[in-house]
Amino acid sequence: MTTIFDSRDTRYKTPYGAAPCGSAVTVTLRPPRDFTAGALLLFEEFADAYWEQPLAFALGEDGQGILAASYETPEQPELIWYAFRLQKEDGEAVWLGRNGLCQEEKALAWWQQTVYDASSPTPEWFGRGVTYQIFPDRFRRLAVPDPAGMLGDRVVHQNWEEGMEYLPDEKGEVRNRDFFGGSLAGVEEKLDYLKSLGVGTIYFCPIFESDSNHRYNTGDYEKIDPMLGTEEDFGRLCCKAHALGIRVMLDGVFNHTGSNSRYFNAQGAYPGAGAFQSRESPYYPWYAFLYWPNRYDAWWGVKTLPAVNETCPSYMDYIIEGKDSIIRRWLRAGADAWRLDVADELPDEFIARIRAVMVQEKPDSFLLGEVWEDGSNKIAYDQRRKYLLGREAHGLMNYPFRTAALAYLQGGGAEAFVEAMEVIRENYPRPAFYSAMNLLGTHDTARVLTMLGVGPEGGPEERTARADYRMSPEERERGTRLLRAGAVLLYAFPGSPTVYYGDEAGMEGFEDPFNRGTYPWGHEDQALQRHFALLGRLRNERASMQSGELKWLHAKGPLLAFAREEGEEVTAAILNVGDGVEEVSIPWSGHLATDVISGQQFAPVQDRLLLRIPGMECILLV
């Protein structure tokens, strides 16, 4: 059957995917012969405006009748939902949507047209380079710290390699008060190692003072946690990183503070009155008390994480707008980027103001949002969000990539991976798609090696058993082979390939906190390290891997092949995640193709390569 309309084919719609404000969009349909008229149906969601554009009939070059229309996108960012009504000469009508032809309009599944503000450019450096995520307490320590005088009742592990605490205390709470003593000076010592991996951005989980080892319950935004170091240590780290071509991204936790903070001060640990202590506190308006002081709005009901009212003028001034605001202060101290924790719980205006201030303070700085779904159309708290419409985040954490990649690596078809990524590619503005933080694991997910080795349903269920679990040699071998393939997929795909510290060294572990072990210095999987280092070097050397156009070559069952093309430079990734040998023929013009992983070379025949890929193997052709 002839395709009537394909939103991802430029023969049917131009431009591909999202369009800037005030630009032209053209649609072309190739309907059955008896349909000679119709209309393009459009609904602008934010403007709450519905309108129709007549489809003009003409004969295409092949003599087939076509229906076409053009329209100009609005001057303001928008989500447009569109579909079609087709009519025969006798007036009979059918409707066309993503779900095909429908006999009535209410059955339509509408296409999405993202319209974004392209006037504020996205810095290109983030999407081109490799990102390395560090959980600061667990990466590298130079000495066992003394917790005396530090915020909270901290316990420090004397042995770097022992397990972390994870069981509830006598009150039934998991307090995360055990520390290992990783520091900024420790990261500084390992900058050359990070450079050898091709890292261009260090993404730090929170580094500000807090009484927990994860530091997502901020105590003081103005102070580096003393177990990590000082502001001077941070500045020196940034300076040395910059000299190596490495930028620094900080984690901004602005939806809530810690209850044990200078702002809330429930335990009286800070001088001065916090909101918990006095309604006259300058911080009192930041919080929403149901009954002061003990009942208040908290993040997901966690009482140690009192939620803030981000639109409170004094809070907005403190975090964003003031001349010495938190956003400005740490950019001046050396940071190059901010990652916004739980961005879907921050108001759009709050995010937009952060971006505006970042542009003022450091025009080349980058703003990343934590969003776990398709960020172009997400609804949070009953509101359609505008993260990617050109005035808020430059890019988002690409959890949809992780979901689709792990499903494919664990036995799902390559077809499903391609479809999932095409949805994102079509919906996201191009700068946002190429600036996504692509990842296979983070501090919020199980270690990718464990996921791939034991499988989605594998491993023990009981928590203590999960804490102590180590993969069998067979599980580890399988996980490692699949992770090698997953790393090729990660580094060859558009967006910033992001490595959670230690994944390149073969760290394993289930969900939080078992995914937050200490880096295994001296016990790394060196072959896996070399694989990641090779991919990092190639990512930095090859323009096609940084910014090249994405071209799908093959996607069926366990076999996935795609190319990145920049001018005449081509890089092609071919993955076989099945157990058996797979054959594939891909286009390749001219010269010999070299697999940079094995060194093997392939000669094209009539501009095609015939490749045999063993099970759970991958090649990267240049």
Image (tube, grey):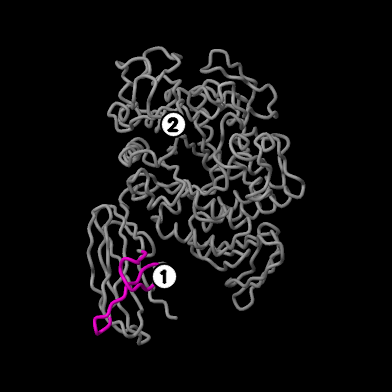
**Which residue reaches farthest bottom?**
63
Taking the image as shown, residue 294 lies to the left or right of residue 164, namely left
Q: Position of residue 415 (x, y in %)?
A: 55, 65
Instruction: Find out whether residue 97 is within the magenta segment.
Output: yes
Q: Which residue is mark 1?
A: 9
Q: Residue at x 38, y 52 (%)?
A: 376
Query: What residue span does the magenta drawing correspond to?
Result: 88-109
Q: Position of residue 122 (x, y in %)?
A: 39, 48
Count of marks placed on residues: 2
In which quadrant of the rendered view does residue 587 lie? bottom right
Question: Circle 1 — which element?
Answer: loop
Q: Residue at x 69, y 59 (%)?
A: 616
Give the quadrant of the C terminus: bottom right
Q: Which residue is mark 2?
A: 301
- Specify the amino acid type for callout 2: Gly
Question: Circle 2 — which element?
Answer: helix
Q: Residue at x 41, y 60 (%)?
A: 426
Taking the image as shown, residue 603 lies to the left or right of residue 359, namely right
Task: Tell me if mark 1 has few (under 14), some (14-19) or many (20+) residues whose alpha carbon lies within 10 angstroms of its own.
Answer: few
Measured in 3D between alpha carbons, the distance from the residue under mark 1 to the one under mark 2, in whole angstroms, is 46 Å
Q: Position of residue 242 (x, y in %)?
A: 50, 36
181 to 404, vertically: above or below: above
Taking the image as shown, residue 76 lies to the left or right of residue 439, namely left
Instruction: Find out whether residue 165 is within the magenta segment.
Output: no
121 to 257, vertically: above or below: below
77 to 111, vertically: above or below: above
In which quadrant of the rendered view does residue 146 lie? top right
- Specify the amino acid type for callout 1: Asp
598 to 168, vertically: above or below: below
In which quadrant of the rendered view does residue 172 lie? top right
Task: Tell me if mark 2 has few (under 14), some (14-19) or many (20+) residues whose alpha carbon lies within 10 angstroms of its own.
Answer: few
